[in-house]
Amino acid sequence: MPFPAAQDSARQRSGASSGTFPQVSIEATPGECAVFVPQNPFVRWADKSANFAEGVMPIGGPSGPTTTIMVTLRSAEKDAIDKADFAYTDDLASRCSQFDLASTESGRTSTYALQLLPAPLVGEKPIGEKQYGLMQTTKPKGPGDFGLVGLRVLAGTVSITLNLSVAVLNSESDAKPALDSMAGLAKELIDQAVKKPPTVAPLPPNSRSADDLVALFKNVTGPNGNPVTLPGASVIGPVPGFTASAPSSQGAAPPCTFSDSAYYGSLVGAVLGQGQIQGATKMDYTVFSVISMPTTATPPYPFDARAAALRDCATIQEEMVGSGPRPWSAVSQLNTAIAADSGYAVAYQVSDGTGEWHVRAGARKGSLSVEAGSQTSSLAEAQAKAEEFAAFFGSVFSNAGL
């Protein structure tokens, strides 16, 4: 069985500290039964006392909530993870065999009935040191409401939480197939942790963490005072099949390729955040990225090669992820005034029939670079947009103490 693809936990953790996620509260009745309810994800992501990973595991059939197991793994010192995720006695489990739960998000409350279930055996043995199942249904139950079956297992320093939606959930027998599937997966995950220790090489150190990058944008505003949103950041890992190479020397008028996938593939160990600045209208917005290079990297950075190519190339072809390449036409260099070690600002059009101008600009100061892109209706507006980007870059560099 293939194991679940994990989401980027560094991005989730930094996102929890960004203040952009909704406020969620969970309340159990009786209150002592709250120990049997996993933390809501935004609290779990912010908890730095334990490492975590999250992912999904399809179990066959068309992709959907009833065919996809949600997987959460947490790890900490033995006593710490036991106390954090399994701090209950057999007597408490007996008292909480059935209890109610209320979850409130953005002012809207949903209520549920929960029942603890015995965890199934695997090979006539318990899965871990502690384990229990649960089934959750809406209260009151409405037509078409799905139920949820969960399984939690403690094995050494690893806490496993698995959840699967079930279309019909009226009794323990309805929950059994889901519990059996999750028990098998939990056993495989435990075996994986025991038999296959980590083999991924550590990434190079970075002077800025993902949380540090998110903090740079708190209280920063874009043009017209609009808020800047950076929901999270993460460390760039190796891209399978990609080998970075040194940039080739540029001729007088060479064709050049603008490829984000190749660019990011050359940034292993860098911390990357991607965000958005909302403009005056819904369709008026700017996307931006910020990159902190690892401390082991030395100039010229990959950003410098990108900036030089955009400044010097006569023709540019963009390689888009998921679709074919497209040439940039009417490429124009734009002037911006910002003190930086390296930078670029260009406007261009593509043959999409809209007549819109695309604006891209970037600047690097030290090991930190910021890039932004937007669209305008004219070249004159593109120049004004590039100047706005330059002011935004300056605010970011100032926040970073550069």
Image: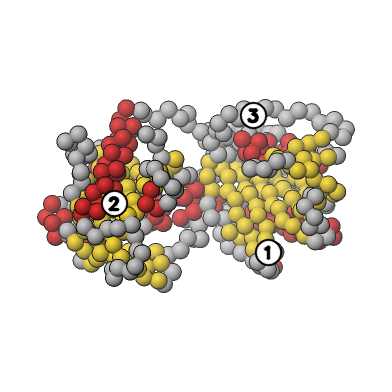
Q: Is residue 42 left or right of residue 345?
A: left
For residue 146, above or below residue 126: below
Q: Residues within 10 Å of mark 2 (few under 14, many from 20)?
A: many
**Closer to the N terminus: mark 1 or mark 2?**
2
Disc 3, SS:
loop
Q: Quadrant of the N terminus?
A: top left
Which residue sits furthest bottom? 107
Q: Nearer the viewer, residue 293 or 118?
A: 118
Disc 2, SS:
strand
**Closer to the N terminus: mark 3 or mark 2?**
2
Q: Name the quadrant containing residue 327.
A: top right
Q: Name the quadrant containing residue 251.
A: top right
Instruction: Give me the residue at 28% from left, 62% from top.
Output: 137
Q: Residues within 10 Å of mark 3 (few under 14, many from 20)?
A: some
Q: CA distance from mark 1 to mark 2?
A: 41 Å
Q: Amino acid at mark 1?
A: Met
Q: Amino acid at mark 2?
A: Gly
Disc 1, SS:
loop
* Mark 3 or mark 1, whichever is nearer to me: 1
For residue 150, which numbered disc appears in the image? 2
Q: Nearer the viewer, residue 382 or 344?
A: 382
Residue 81 is at least partly visible in this image: no
Q: Total marks drawn?
A: 3
**Closer to the N terminus: mark 3 or mark 1?**
3
Q: Can you give x and y, in whole percent of width and height, for residue 86 in the image?
A: 23, 49
Q: Nearer the viewer, residue 141 or 325?
A: 141
For residue 244, which numbered disc appears in the image? 3
Which residue sits furthest left? 91
Instruction: Give me the residue at 32% from left, 27% from top.
Output: 195
